[in-house]
Image (spheres, helix red, strand yellow):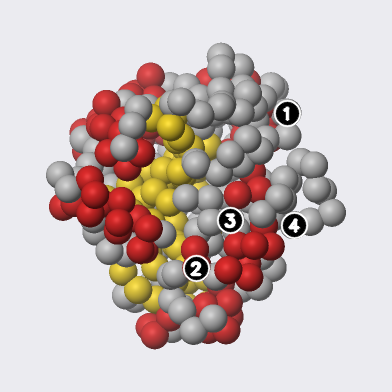
Amino acid sequence: MRGCVVGGREVPQELIGELRDSASLLEQPVSLRARLAEDGYLFLRGVLDRDAVMAARQEVLARLAAVDEIAPGSDIFTGRSARRAKEPDLGRFWRSVSEGPKLRAVTHGRDIGRVMEIVAGEAPRAQDFLFLRVGVPGRATGLHFDYPFFTRLHDTVWTVWTSVGDTPVARGPLMVVENSHRFSDLVESVVGFDVVRDTSRKAAFAENAIDFARSRNTRLLTANFAAGDVILFGMYMLHGSLDHHDDSGTVRVSTDLRWQPARLAADPRYFGDAPTGTTGAGYGELNGAKPLDVDWHVR
């Protein structure tokens, strides 16, 4: 797969691989869950309605066009922002964008709910706190586990990453480290780690993902995502993103949302009408709340 870039370096072909599509197993729940245990992730092409996903994308982009970050009627970054001038409460603004009805119809709707019920084998529940990300050229997210963020009460939690629009590899989609859920030394190192309570530790890996993959004799797995595709994984799958290096200026829009069995205890940080988020700052703590012209590279 060509055009995969991490940390400004193109990923060598021997270190990059395609995600395995498991959508055909949705009618075979036992096999689907076995695939999740085997691969550590489920890549599901076309499980969401494409028209609904594209409507959600346009809803988000219209809000960003109103603050001069997206050229009107397009999905191109303007290179500037009037967000702070027009929306002085950045957290409240980002919450309003993240709670758009068309976006929520995709992230919390019937299609993904059906998928998660099959994965869980019981009634599922989605967190209310949504991580919405809009990526511009130069952006990337470093390798990390989700364990330190979302497992204060239990670890039966799944992250669902949704491509809100088409996200070819040049726009920096999500990648996972192949078989990293079996890297027992790394998995054991995060058990008991809470990013809020243990501030002396770092959640992201400093090592470049290419160097990491080579040192572990593994690969980085990704895909040219299309609207309607999702990938889900548990708390012990090492993942990050490719660099967004599409010089057209087209933004990547994606969401990640956590699901769990409905019967299990719900972390109040992520549920309810006004969830406080990981640190207590609500939607204001997210990188997404920052104007698009502000530089950031890792979560």
2 and 1 marks in contact (CB < 8 Å): no
Which residue is labeled 4 in the image?
202
Q: CA distance from mark 2 to mark 4?
A: 21 Å
Q: Nearer the viewer, mark 3 or mark 2?
A: 2
**Residue 209 in the image: above or below residue 50:** below
Q: Nearer the viewer, mark 2 or mark 1?
A: 2
Q: Nearer the viewer, mark 2 or mark 4?
A: 2
Q: CA distance from mark 3 to mark 2?
A: 13 Å
4 and 3 marks in contact (CB < 8 Å): no
Whether residue 12 is visible, yes or no, is yes
Which residue is labeled 3 in the image?
145
Q: Residues within 10 Å of mark 1 (few under 14, many from 20)?
A: few
Find residue 145 and report its horizontal and vertical position in percent.
Answer: 58, 56
Q: CA distance from mark 2 to mark 1?
A: 32 Å
Badge 2 element: helix
Which residue is labeled 2 in the image?
182
